Structures are given as C-alpha cells and as structure tokens.
Amino acid sequence: MRIVIAKPGLDGHDRGAKVVARALRDGGHDVIYTGLRKTPDEIVRIVNDEDAEVLGLSTLSGAHDSLIPKICQKLKISGLSNVVVFAGGIIPDRDRSDLHNSGVRAVFGPGTPTSDILHFLEEVKSRKNKHQEVGVGQDPGWHWN
C-alpha cells in the first residue's frame, strides 16, 4: 500500500513517526514521510500528490483533537474519502471516540508494537479487496482499536 506518514502542527519530535515509517517500509509498503510541522492543507496536498491509500498522523503536542479532525474533513472535501487514516502518539483514551467519529480508523499509543500497525494495514487491505468501504469518508462500522 502507498502510505503517507505526517507530523501535523508544531510538534518537533519525530522519532516515533520515523520508526513507524521504517517498519511499514520494511513490511513491504511504499512509505512517504512528510517531515515535521505540516499544516492540514499541506498534508492533504501531499496525500493527493502521492496518490496515497493510507495516511498515518503522529502527534505528541496535544493538538490532536483539533488538527486530526480538520485533516479528515479536508480529505473528504478534497475528494479523498477513500483514504484510510490512522493516528499515533500521545492521545488520551477519552479523545479516541471523537477521532473515530471524524474518520480515524485506528489509534496507536506509545509502545505499540509496529506489528500491530502492520496487522491493521492487512485488515484494511482485506476489507478493500472485499470492496468494503473503509476510508475517512465512510462509516464502515469498525475501528481497529
């Protein structure tokens, strides 16, 4: 799968995002890492330009509750409703349902084995192969976690 890994907002810590990007690449995926401090508009443009199927968002700054829903909304508006979005970083349990409602299909916290993310992507691919709608613009009735 073609995957963009992005760091929205002013968060300057990207070690986790780089670890995930490398693990996904080693798992056979085509991964594009955007670098630090991307705006929602920049992230959506990169997803579009790279023809990505999946977007992974990494956030440690506490701005996940405003930035991630904004990115999901911009994906929908831009005609990218088929893109599957997952998030990682410091995201409290109490905020996860709001992120799922905005279109995020999985949230991975600190210490999550990268194999869990690879299993999530296998499930996404399986559902897509069965022609089930799983992107940010659909409500497939499932979330990975």
Image (tube, rainbow, N blue to C red):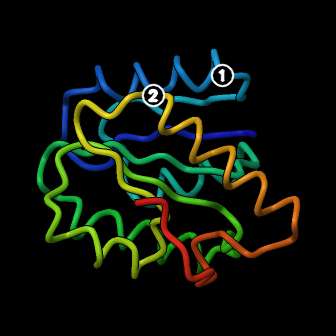
Name the element at disc 2: helix
Viewer-proximal residue, 78 or 126? Answer: 126
> Residue 78, position in %: x, y?
64, 74
| Residue bearing mark 2 | 114
Q: Quadrant of the C terminus?
A: bottom left
> Residue 99, position in %: x, y?
33, 71
> Residue 65, position in %: x, y?
21, 68
Q: Is residue 27 above or below residue 54?
A: above
Q: Are marks 1 and 2 in contact (CB under 8 Å)?
A: yes
In screen coordinates, is 6 left or right of 2? left
In screen coordinates, is 70 left or right of 60? right
In which quadrant of the rendered view does residue 31 lie?
Answer: top right
Q: Residue at x 20, y 27 (%)?
A: 13
Q: On residue 27, which mark appears?
A: 1
Quote the CA–CA distance across marks 1 and 2.
10 Å
Q: Is residue 33 above or below residue 22?
A: below
Q: Residue at x 67, y 70 (%)?
A: 134
Give the amino acid at mark 2. Answer: Thr
In which quadrant of the rendered view does residue 139 lie?
Answer: bottom right
Give the amino acid at mark 1. Answer: Gly
Task: Judge the density around disc 2: few (<14), some (14-19), many (≥20) Cα neighbours within 10 Å.
Answer: some
Ranked by sequence position, the earlier of labels 1 and 2 is 1
